[in-house]
Every structure is written in C-alpha cells, then in structure tokens.
Image (cartoon, helix red, strand yellow):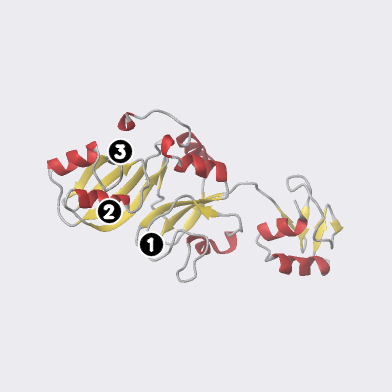
Amino acid sequence: MRLDRFLSEMNLGTRSQVKGYLRQGLVTVNGVPERSADRRIEETRDLVSFQGRLLRYRQYVYYMLNKPAGVVSATRDSQAKTVVELLGADYRGDLFPVGRLDKDTEGLLLLTNDGDLAHRLLSPSRHVDKVYQVKVAHSLSREDVACLEQGVDIGEEKDTLPAVVEVQEADQILLTIQEGKFHQVKRMLQAVDNQVLALKRIGFGGLRLDGELEPGAYRELREEEVTALQEAGKKRPDKRSL
C-alpha cells in the first residue's frame, strides 16, 4: 500500500494533508523518517508512526450505529447528514453502510469496509433476518397477522417472503423479514390496510441493537458479534423461504 493512502485511511487527513506531514518529517517507517508519499509499505508488518505515535492498521473494521431519524444511509449527500459523518474521528474513507434504512427510520445499521461480508449479508439467497419494531396506526387483527406471515402483495412480481409477527402492544409489533425491498415494511403494512407511524430496526443478521447506544451513537463490534454476522452470511435453507 502507498504510504499516503495508509495515512489517509488512518484518519490523519486527506492525501494532500498527509503529504504535508511527510514533507515536515512527522512520519517514520520502522523508526526511519520517511518523506516520500509513494513509498510502498506492508501495512500489517511495517511500523509506521506519526509524531511518535504508532499507527496500528486493521484491514477490516465493523461498527454498530444506532441511526437517528433525519440522517441518510449513504457515504455522501449534498443535502442531508450521512451515517458515516456520525463516526467522527473513527471515520476512514473506505467505510460504508451495509444496506440502508430510510431517512425517517431509526435503529441498527452496520458500518464496515468488509465488502465481501456486506455482499453476503445483503444477498437475497442468504435470507438474513432483519427485525423491526413497528408502531402502527391501529391494532392488527388475527387475519392481518396471518397475511403478513404468509406473504403479502406489495406490488412486486412476487409476494413478500413469509414474515414473523410478534404483537407487543395494541399499536406496536415486532416484524422479522428476510428481504430488503424499497420501503418494504411500510408497504407490507399498507397491504393489510394499516400504516407505519414509527419504525426502528433492532436486529440484523444475528446482531441486536445495543440498548446503551443513544440515537447517533456507535461502537465497534465485539469479536463474537462479527462471528455471528459471518455465520448469518452463510447460505442456508430457511423454512420461511420454502
């Protein structure tokens, strides 16, 4: 990896900024000052320091974000704040959200630079669970629940895959689905003559939203949580898709 790219991914600044640091002699490689931006390094072996501070490189990073309403699930947007902007000093240029939550939807969003895992988690063939807490306009009848659990017509070529519905309160349900179609939860509730008043994702691929994370807060995933995601990304049959 080029040294200037490495320094940028370690959140030290843009390529032009880190080139300035190099010219000032603020960077060492294996204890020797380095001024060349195009110096090639082995990022997992060479010891790179900035102003005496050792920079430890990790190929993949994983963050759980409690996405607040009003923030868009994108890496850049000309009008609204994006989820990657919430990472502050932990932001690195190769991070992206895994999938998307609507602008007005809150809850669990995974941010990573692991493209292979993201692809597997989002692949329709993997049938990865997504759990939503849904506030509805009025209570669901038994017939409504049965329809959602069988699959409903939301205007696509095929009905939705069967869902799991847990009624928590008269106006609140937990809805578990295995797809990620545009506005899917809202369209599913419309299909049974209801309306979503508030939507929050609390589960994704074996992860559960950390109850200590306030809206807009995030934390790095623990090792066992990354393992759970990797297991969720493995192709396996599921009775709800048969």
Tell me: residue 11, above or below residue 151: below
Q: Which residue is mark 1?
A: 103
Name the amino acid type tagged 2.
Lys
Image coordinates of residue 11 in percent, x first then y, are 65, 61
User: Is 119 displayed left or right of 182 in the figure?
Assistant: right
Residue situated in front as seen by the camera: 188 or 158: 158
Residue 221 appears left or right of 30: left
Mark 1 or mark 2: whose residue is earlier in sequence: 1
Horizontally, residue 186 falls left or right of residue 92, namely left
Task: Choose the circle earlier in sequence order: 1 or 3.
Answer: 1
Badge 3 vs badge 2, beta-carbon distance below 8 Å: no
* Image location of residue 159, percent across then percent down: 27, 40
Element marked by disc 3: loop
Q: Residue at x 68, y 50 (%)?
A: 57
- Residues under labels 1 and 3: Cα distance? 24 Å
Q: Amino acid at mark 3?
A: Leu
Residue visible at 77% across and 70% down in the picture: 20
User: What label sits on residue 161 in the rendered view?
Assistant: 3
Residue type at the position of mark 1: Lys
Q: Where is 144 relative to 138, above or below?
A: above
Q: CA distance from mark 1 to mark 2?
A: 13 Å
What is the spatial separation of the Cα atoms under label 3 and label 2, in whole angstroms? Answer: 15 Å
